Image (cartoon, rainbow, N blue to C red):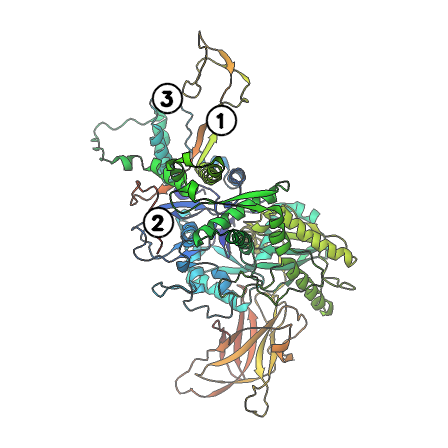
Amino acid sequence: MGMAGGWVNAKTSRVAGSTADDFARTWRKQLRLFFPTARFQGLHFLFFMQNSSTSPSFFTRLKLAGRVLTDVSFAGRISQLLSPAVAPAAPAATPVAKPVERSPAEEHASGLAVLAMLQREGRLIDFLKEDVAAFSDAEIGAAARVVHAGSRKVLSQYFTLAPIMTEAEGAAVTIKPGFDAQQICLTGNIAGQPPFRGELKHHGWIATEVRLPAVSASMDARVVAPAEVQL
Amino acid sequence: MARFSIGIDLGTTNSAVSYFDLGRDNARGGEQLMLAIPQVTSLGTVEPKFLLPSFLYLPNAQEFPAGSLALPWDSARNESVVGEFARAHGSKVPTRLVASAKSWLGHSGVDRQSAILPWQAPSDVKRVSPVEASRLYLEHLRGAWDHQFPDAPFAAQEIVLTVPASFDAGARELTLAAAQQAGLANITLLEEPQAAFYAWTEQMGERFRQHVRPGDLILVVDVGGGTSDFSLIAVTEKDGEVQLTRVAVGDHILLGGDNMDLALAYSVSQRLAADGRKLDAWQFTALTHACRQGKEMMFADVRVKSAPLVIPGRGTSLIGGTVRAELSREELTRVLTDGFFPQCAASDLPQTNRRTGLAQMALPYAQDPGVTRHLASFLTRQANALATAHDTPVDIAGKAFVHPTAVLFNGGVFKAGVLKDRVLEVINQWLAADGGQPAKELAGAELDLAVARGAAYYGWARQGHGLRIRGGTARAYYVGVETAVPAVPGMEPPVRALCVAPFGMEEGTQADVPPQEFGLVVGEPTRFRFFSSSVRRDDTVGIMIDDPTDNADLEELAPIESALPAQAGAEGRLVPVNLQAAVTELGTLELRCIEKGGAGQWKLELNVRMKE
């Protein structure tokens, strides 16, 4: 028996106060402890390592991921959708449903939800909207701790980010023919054919897991932070 | 037929659920499954977490948009919300927040079945009783379970619900009542320190026997969010088999990890106030969070000398509105390590003459924040009790206090290695001074989740699979009997305490019937005063104790009441009865009136209303 209903695991409540690193460690540990990998592969996870030019846009992926988390049967279908080789042929006779008109806010609800979480936990919008010119570095630094701690919590809670290249930055690396041009960006003197030899400047990041929660459709996604009125 | 044993840790600040497939023939080892509990984390958002904060928020009808408190199994929910959002939002609206319902459940100074929470709520808030709040938490857990395991309904499983070892008969009864109102059927109660010990043995597997040997005496120090709970478990051997006996439990101490973070925040906010910077309630909550983070950072790395505390302002001006402060190592040690875990002698007693300044509510918080002093008093009192007991498995001869050989820690507080080290250091100083061997730590405990896991394991072990801790009731119970003396105006007749249930009664057993006889009037309520003792181990049924109210060994509980049904025509009839106590299979105490020379039998209700 697994996590029927598709609720993904995440341990957070007691996390208040532990560092994000601690949190990530604990979370991974819990994950191993309680949910042997076989149980949730293909159910809760959506890997972004694909290389296909027809793969969905980033935000569509985010939304898919969100839905995968909450809808098991959908998760089953999505894995088919994402692997064209096994996609079933659409029955010819079925009329194509007219796409429902969706507002930009509805279309990008999960993007707005990420903004809302970064604001709620890390006050990121307040920070970016504030004019920093008038403040000293020490004052900005103090506020940055709030932003850093909260945003880091959001990042580790909802995303797993891994380096694209595992070599140490500064190391000499070889880029083989057929490399993924989206994952690896070449700079400097590019000439001839791979394999290319170069120095790793930035190891890159890739989201290997997305665990965005489902947000009720009755909520207006445009509200990133409500106005607060003290009575 | 139950498929799972479900362990529920219904905690003061967090609840958790673990489950065990009863079809297994071996223990789970490290793979102890926890239920992910979906809960509202912000409006319109439901996320699963292993811990459900035990907070209940009662919103105003206009406060939240429709549908924003919906749960996957309850889409129309709008009257109350439980869990993370309740805690977070409630900190901004404290008059609508129910917190620490469990502490109220154990508080005999209030009527625990009347709607009294939130304490000091405005009149338009629909209040709930401590029992109802507990019921709502359990209903949430039930909903979460049924949503994930539709084929194995919660109510049909074996459920083990944990209670503090220090909970008296009344508080246990009320916990059970809340569970029954939440629709739970097959329930067993288990003491939390025992559950923590079970979780540890399961985690250790067979290695457990290398760490624990016959002759050992294990002290469980369980400091939760709101309570501190101590138990002693003796390891003995009989016919080559290891036996575990819970020999003593501590008194109910309302002192826990939440007090510690608050104490730090008070200390810092006083410094800020001295500089003319006053924090509002919202900022104070932020400061408490910041203190907790700073504390954990400094406890994790002993080289860090101070932690920056940043309290954001409420307005959009984050940089301009931020208040900065600092938590120094000296302050952390003074307030927390020395304040809550002071160095003290084994003969020290908790101070009762001053308030700590933390009493915000009408709960009877411990007056002395020194956990180590409460521990000293527990070990000393129990030594006196065990020294005179006839069948003690513990050797007390020549010792000033009970000498534990090992310590098992439980509770998130002890994630700070510094605090574990301090407790061990203090205990070992006592032991050295009393000529004993140092006690070792039983390492490797999972501090946050052990109680739920151990409870689930117990549900499986009690079906004959594993070692069980024996011990029975950790208290003896007495009813107050007025002595017949000529009436003197202005003088209450003296009361004596009649022992009806001896120490150590096992589940599913009943005590002897004491010879004393009472006359009950049919149709009229009769009340008895009710007492308990955690140290009088040798009192047998029928023993009378003079002057129980002045006896330090006895604690008065809420009274009990007879509920003799009035049959037609029988009102006013005087029925001679004897009292008898039984411990149910569920782990609660039941008192009965048995009609003398007749077939009548009535259950006495533990009156949970205010003790007068």
**Left/right of residue B334 with respect to residue B287 in the rendered view:** right
Q: In this rendering, is residue A116 above or below B519?
A: above
Q: Residues within 10 Å of mark 1 (few under 14, many from 20)?
A: few
Instruction: Kindly identify which chain the residue marked by label 2 belongs to.
Output: A
Q: CA distance from mark 2 to mark 1?
A: 39 Å
Q: Secondary structure at mark 3?
A: loop
**Residue A218 in which image quadrant:** top left
| Residue of label 2 | A228
Q: Are marks 3 and 2 in contact (CB under 8 Å)?
A: no
Residue A54 x, y percent position in the rendering: 33, 23
Q: Secondary structure at mark 2?
A: loop
| Mark closer to the observer (1, 3) | 1
Q: In this rendering, is residue B301 above or below A187?
A: below
Residue A97 x, y percent position in the rendering: 21, 33
| Residue of label 3 | A52
| Residue of label 1 | A163
Please state which amino acid type lies under the numbered disc 2.
Glu
Circle on res. B129: none
Please state which amino acid type lies under the numbered disc 1.
Pro
Tell me the residue at 62%/73% (across/down): B554
Instruction: Kindly identify which chain the residue marked by label 3 belongs to.
Output: A
**Of callouts 3 and 2, the N-terminal one:** 3
**Residue A103 in which image quadrant:** top left
Residue B363 x, y percent position in the rendering: 51, 65
